[in-house]
RNA sequence: GACUCAGUAGCUCAGUAGGUAGAGCACAUCCCUUUUAAGGAUGGGGUCCUGGGUUCGAAUCCCAGCUGGGUCACCA
């Protein structure tokens, strides 16, 4: 029997033809463990009493502490030297070395636990539990001297092997597709990935604590909305069967939070997943996290102070300093942040003072600056274009851009002193918008007119103009106190705070195209039924024909060539069938 | 959506003016009681992303597609 087929014959499960050599070895080990009485997936709890990090932080030989530790983790490397071995396990806090001596874990005559279980049946990636004591090796490495070792979970798939020495990493898994589709593997083998996500949670916890200290209330509002309001974006649409109505995944939660301010809360906030059916790139994922907060009796100037205090606090909580590395730049989140009006920004970066300019004048300015326009653009849109093209990218250090044109801000209160503007700010960091805030529009008549303006835009073909939310207007008509609200992109904030330039690196599971699922494989019997000799079945599977049905769709000549070619190429030594025989198989 | 780069062993990657597919780690077998990214020896493992085309011959050249990355466009 040719070597190549031995692995296929050990199993008769239908999927076995798909397995790599190493996966087959591991499945064999799994069975052998059971044969010698070791359950590879035991049920009882395993009473861990310490983490590897705690031992590293606190072990002192002179104190003689950590002499009865119980730790559990994933086996990450192994160096076997006869009757003694070194290995590393990794728990949620890091890695630690193990020292295992044959005669200590096998005090009796039977040395199977060491010779069979540890040396042969255990694999890198298996999850084990150990009992032992801490000590330093002659090389000065903190190590656990193992007294007992036990199986907690068998790993059937080989992990990528990543090695490291003196901070230098070897053979790191860098393939983006692999890392995002199998984030669980990324987390196991790339420690800095875990760190990013720990920081992400710390950012959220710091913000939450900041809000709660001031007595603001964390709330939840609907994700399924019948009118997707509060922002301009294309929504995802779904359908509710019982009500037989379309529902939309929220693009924002603004209008619901304001309803709660109407209802009498002084401050409400929500960490919210929003969904937008638009393009994906380094800074956009279809679902993303936003924190929105609304505080009664405040205005946007108060909110600027509040926002910079919050962000400075986050930076300090994470880094102990306000200076944060981002790519080749250092961003300083020390408050106060610079404040620049939109008109000042445009004047500074283009030389044009556009205050009081008409739409036609703005259009001419755009032409001079080389900015493309189209006739549907109104005054606000033109100003927004100029800012976006010529100014935005210049604001690397945190800067509040304030006082936006009214046309771009349908939910914002009109400016207290300047005609045509609103009381709005955006916080720019590294040339990107990080936060957006207003003095909220609470005049229900003005709000209705703004919605109607949006409706007209929609009728002109702008598919992103806002819908009119009649219930929201009804709420405003009961009276909403003067309120300031702010929204901040948590994914972007995390990118800035963790020095990641892609949103995919701050989301555990970024959106990907679905993987093609491997086709099921017909079992041997199906192939035998149509007269194919057993020794040819693996060959047929290897050339990509997984099902008997596939054989009906292939040309006989190609099939004949392929299987004989495979036989020759791999030196299987099989006797090639005749063309007549093959024709019968496929008949 | 446009342009562009990439896809070779479980992982990281070589490779060829078209001519039998390579390394390191991992894996298997054997030797070794304090090793350090990797002790020594031997060995197994590939639909070179998929499908067409050119050719005596394609992993390599051409076309199309799939998946991913980057840039741009669109968009908060």
Image (cartoon, helix red, strand yellow):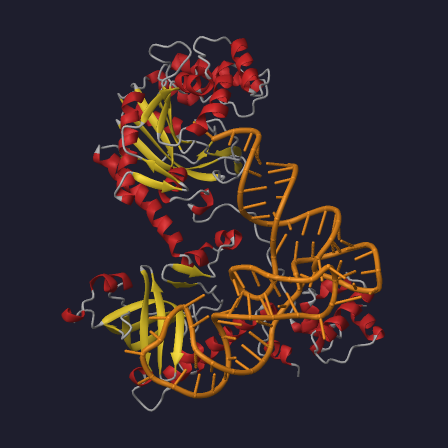
Q: What x and y, as percent, mark residue A195?
A: 35, 51
Residue at 44 percent of width and 27 percent of height: A392
Q: What x and y, as percent, mark residue A404?
A: 41, 18
Q: What x and y, as percent, mark residue A304?
A: 30, 25
Q: Is residue A538 above or below residue A433?
A: below
Toward the left, the furthest residue is: A63
Q: Is residue B52 left or right of residue A390?
A: right
- Total labels drawn: 0
Quadrant where the image shows the N terminus of chain A: bottom right
Nearest the viewer among A464 and A246 is A464
Q: Is residue A379 left or right of residue B32?
A: right
Q: Is residue B27 above or below residue A235?
A: below
Q: Is residue B53 above or below residue A56?
A: above
Q: What x and y, as percent, mark residue A262?
A: 31, 23
Q: Is residue A118 left or right of residue A358?
A: left
The answer to which image quadrant residue A533 occupies is bottom right
Q: Is residue A438 visible?
A: yes
Q: Is residue A291 left or right of residue A242?
A: left
Residue at 58 percent of width and 79 percent of height: A10
Nearest the viewer among B47 and A587 is B47
Q: Is residue A38 visible?
A: no
Quadrant where the image shows the C terminus of chain A: bottom right
The answer to which image quadrant residue A555 occupies is bottom right
Q: Is residue A228 above or below residue A127?
A: above
């Amino acid at each position: 029997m040719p070597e190549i087929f031995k692995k296929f014959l050990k199993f008769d499960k239908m999927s076995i033809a798909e397995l790599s050599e190493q996966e087959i070895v591991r499945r064999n080990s799994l069975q052998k463990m059971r044969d010698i009485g070791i359950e590879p997936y035991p049920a009882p709890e395993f009473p861990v009493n310490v983490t590897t990090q705690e031992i590293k932080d606190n072990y002192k030989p002179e104190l003689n502490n950590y002499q009865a530790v119980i730790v559990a983790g994933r086996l990450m490397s192994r160096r076997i030297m006869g009757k003694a071995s070194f290995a590393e396990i990794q728990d949620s806090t890091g890695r630690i070395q193990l020292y295992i001596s044959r005669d200590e874990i096998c005090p009796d005559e039977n040395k199977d636990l060491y010779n069979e279980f540890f040396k042969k049946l255990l694999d890198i990636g298996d999850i084990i539990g150990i009992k032992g004591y801490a000590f330093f090796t002659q090389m000065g490495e903190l190590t656990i001297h193992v007294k007992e070792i036990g199986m907690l979970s068998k790993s059937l798939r080989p992990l990528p092997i990543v090695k490291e020495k003196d901070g230098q990493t070897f053979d790191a898994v860098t393939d983006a597709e692999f890392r995002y589709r199998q984030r669980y593997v990324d987390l196991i083998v790339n420690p800095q990935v875990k760190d990013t996500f720990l920081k992400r949670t710390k950012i959220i916890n710091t913000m939450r604590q900041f809000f709660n200290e001031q007595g603001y209330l964390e709330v939840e509002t609907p994700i399924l909305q019948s009118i997707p309001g509060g922002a301009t974006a294309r929504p995802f649409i779904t359908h509710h069967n019982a009500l037989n109505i379309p529902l939309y995944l929220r693009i924002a939660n603004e209008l619901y939070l304001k309803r709660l301010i109407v209802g009498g809360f002084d401050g409400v906030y929500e960490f919210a997943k929003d969904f937008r059916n638009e393009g994906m790139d380094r800074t956009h994922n279809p679902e993303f996290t936003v924190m929105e907060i609304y505080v009664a009796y405040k205005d946007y100037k108060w909110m600027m102070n509040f926002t910079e205090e919050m962000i400075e606090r986050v930076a300090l909580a994470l880094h102990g300093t306000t200076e944060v590395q981002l790519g080749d730049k250092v961003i300083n989140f020390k408050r106060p942040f610079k404040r620049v009006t939109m008109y000042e920004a445009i004047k500074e970066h283009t030389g044009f003072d556009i205050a009081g300019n008409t739409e036609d004048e703005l259009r001419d300015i755009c032409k001079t600056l080389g900015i493309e326009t189209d006739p549907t653009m109104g005054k606000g849109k033109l100003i927004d274009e100029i800012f976006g093209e010529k100014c935005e990218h210049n604001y690397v250090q945190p800067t509040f851009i304030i006082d936006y044109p009214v046309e771009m801000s349908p939910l914002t209160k009109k400016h207290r002193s300047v005609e045509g503007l609103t009381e709005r700010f955006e916080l720019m960091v590294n040339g990107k918008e990080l936060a957006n805030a207003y003095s909220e529009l609470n005049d229900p008549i003005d709000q209705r007119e703004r919605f109607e303006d949006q409706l007209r835009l929609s009728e002109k073909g702008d598919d992103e103009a806002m819908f009119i939310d009649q219930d929201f207007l009804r709420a405003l008509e009961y009276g909403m106190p003067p309120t300031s609200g702010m929204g901040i992109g948590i994914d972007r904030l995390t990118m800035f705070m963790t020095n990641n330039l892609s949103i995919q690196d701050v989301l555990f599971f970024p959106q990907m195209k679905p993987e093609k699922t491997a086709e099921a494989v017909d079992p041997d019997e199906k192939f035998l039924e149509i007269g194919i000799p057993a020794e040819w079945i693996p060959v047929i599977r290897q050339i990509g024909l997984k099902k008997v049905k596939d054989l009906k769709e292939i040309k006989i000549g190609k099939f004949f060539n392929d299987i004989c070619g495979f036989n020759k190429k791999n030196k299987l030594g099989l006797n090639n069938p005749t063309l007549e025989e093959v024709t019968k198989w496929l008949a």
